[in-house]
Amino acid sequence: MPIKLQQIDPCRWRIPREGKMRVEGLVFADRAMIEVLQKEQALEQVRNVATLPGIVGRSIAMPDIHWGYGFPIGGVAAFDPEDGGVVSPGGVGYDINCGVRLLRSELEAEEIRPHLKELADALFRNVPSGVGSHRRDLSLAPHETRKVLEQGAAWAVKNGFGSAQDLDHIEERGTIAGADPEVVSERALERGRNQLGTLGSGNHFLEVQRVDEVLDSEAANALGLFQDQVTVSIHTGSRGLGYQVCDDHLKMMLRAAAKYGIELPDRQLCCAPLESPEGRQYLAAMAGAANFAFANRQLITHWVRETFEQVLRTGPSQLRMSLIYDVCHNIAKWETHQVEGRARRLCVHRKGATRAFPPGHPETPELYREVGQPVLIPGDMGRCSYVLVGTEDAFNETFGSTCHGAGRVLSRHAARKLARRRDIPADLAAKGILIRAAGRATMAEEISEAYKDVSEVVEVVRRAGIGRIVARLVPMAVVKG
DNA sequence: ATGTTC
């Protein structure tokens, strides 16, 4: 049966409250996207999330929404601890603190074009990618892994990877408070031991990009972006460690949901009250995994800078590869939001959704205070990515959130089938894009046709006012799993 | 996403 939807405006749709829903659903999408969504399970998942205890406001879906584990990918849901609100591993996802960071440079695209092949090879060599990728030059002792979980990106900086200024430009300054390594299993710690500084697989990537178009010069200036500039994007998460934390806690949450008498429309929504031991324990373990991911992106940044210096035979002062921003898109976090005129401390779940705080917010870095928090939206490897900034409307309507990417339209299997007879590197080369990938299968799963056009996704976000578009980036060289 | 089913 199709989901009942009421159109609010060209880019907003309401899923009215019915049955066991505690709040209504709100979907950001244009008509064409809605027609596709009507045939899928993702909107049913938006409705399921709306039944969970303590949900506040609305169960929200971004224009890149698609089916996920329990909660949809592209979903935002906030819970109030004072109203029995819950935390759910499915509302964060298996890749805890999957996120994106963007580095700027003082280089123009034409300056690196002659070195691009060498640069791609060196990046591919210096940043391990692929399923199970690990580093031989960095295997942490157990007590050191625990420090990473507690300190996140700050651990990396303390150990010589990057600078203190980097930390100013990371969501939560690269350290989620309340991480407790003691509630992370030995197995999770073991899986993470030699995976720090690796890319992983799937949609994770490392890209050398060119600023293709500046769409808002005021905001671009504030972010230090200019036409034809070389930028680098890093998209990865917490690797096997985060996966294991999620898996461990899903099992615990299934028992907890029964113990606290929480009725689940789908077992994959298993959860526990925020103020229960199980809920606190998950949040402490999740924060540890999130910090591991921040450290991971910080270490990769170090090797990216080093690689650029080696290949271009120059130094850091010439390249000025500073960090524009690093933002999470799979996380549950304590944040203060206005609800019905009252400031409330809520646990905001963003699963495939990006924090997008407005100008003037205390969490928005000093340098961007006037324009808002940078929001990094990766597209697929054959098209483009976008830089946005957060808006006041997003803060008021979506708990300060916006979309996170293009969103899949083909399953991995369907994408592989479509790519079967294709020469993917040659297709990308025809567009001027160089690719280095650990395996052909992942490359096939990641072809452009597997994704929605990210330009259409950010256009919905712009029209709805939950993001301001700053610049479009196009890939020059891509490193994939 | 994931030592892609301990």
Image: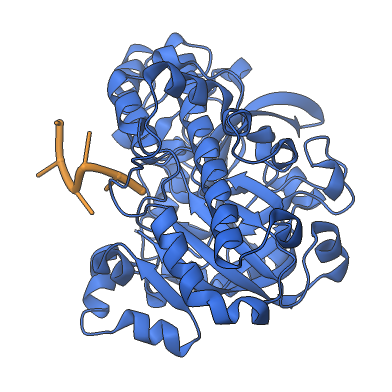
Q: Quadrant of the C terminus of chain A?
A: bottom left
Res. A252 image quadrant: top left
Q: Is residue A155 left or right of residue A356?
A: left
Total of numbered circles in the picture? Answer: 0
Q: Residue at x 29, y 84 (%)?
A: A423
Chain B's shade in the image? orange
Above-or-below relation of A441 to A301: below
Instruction: Please tell me which residue lies in front, A15 or A241.
Output: A241
Instruction: Please tell me which residue lies in front, A470 or A396.
Output: A470
Q: Residue at x 54, y 21 (%)?
A: A150
Res. A346 image quadrant: top right
Above-or-below relation of A444 to A171: below
- Rendered location of residue A431, percent (x, y): 49, 87
Instruction: Please tell me which residue lies in front, A393 or A467.
Output: A467
Above-or-below relation of A324 to A459: above
Q: Residue at x 67, y 39 (%)?
A: A171
Note the chain letter of the blue one: A
Seen as rendered, the residue at the extreme front is: A313
